[in-house]
Image: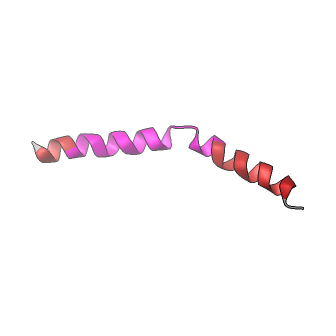
Amino acid sequence: MSTDDIKQQSPDSTEIFRMPSADATVPDLMAQQKPAHP
């Protein structure tokens, strides 16, 4: 039972972290830092 709970939460946590706008935030920060650093 413990393995099933961890296995279902492992993929869920990874998919949620991969699906968030983290990819849109990384380029956003880099794009804003590029002009800030001439």
Q: Is residue 19 left or right of residue 23?
A: left
Name the residue rendered at 28%, 41% in the picture: 9
Instruction: Pinpoint residue 3: horizontal percent, then vertical percent.
Output: 15, 47
Name the residue rendered at 50%, 38% in the picture: 19
Q: Foreground: 32 or 6?
A: 32
Q: Foreground: 23 or 29?
A: 29
Quarter assignment of residue 33:
bottom right
Instruction: Pinpoint residue 28: horizontal percent, then vertical percent.
Output: 72, 45
Q: Quadrant of the N terminus?
A: top left
Q: Is residue 10 above or below residue 19?
A: below
User: Principal SS element in the magenta part?
Assistant: helix
Q: Which residues are magenta?
A: 6-24
Q: Is residue 36 left or right of residue 19?
A: right
Quarter assignment of residue 16:
top left
Instruction: Pinpoint residue 27: horizontal percent, then vertical percent.
Output: 70, 48
Q: Is residue 12 above or below residue 3?
A: above
State the count of labels: 0
Name the residue rendered at 52%, 37% in the picture: 20
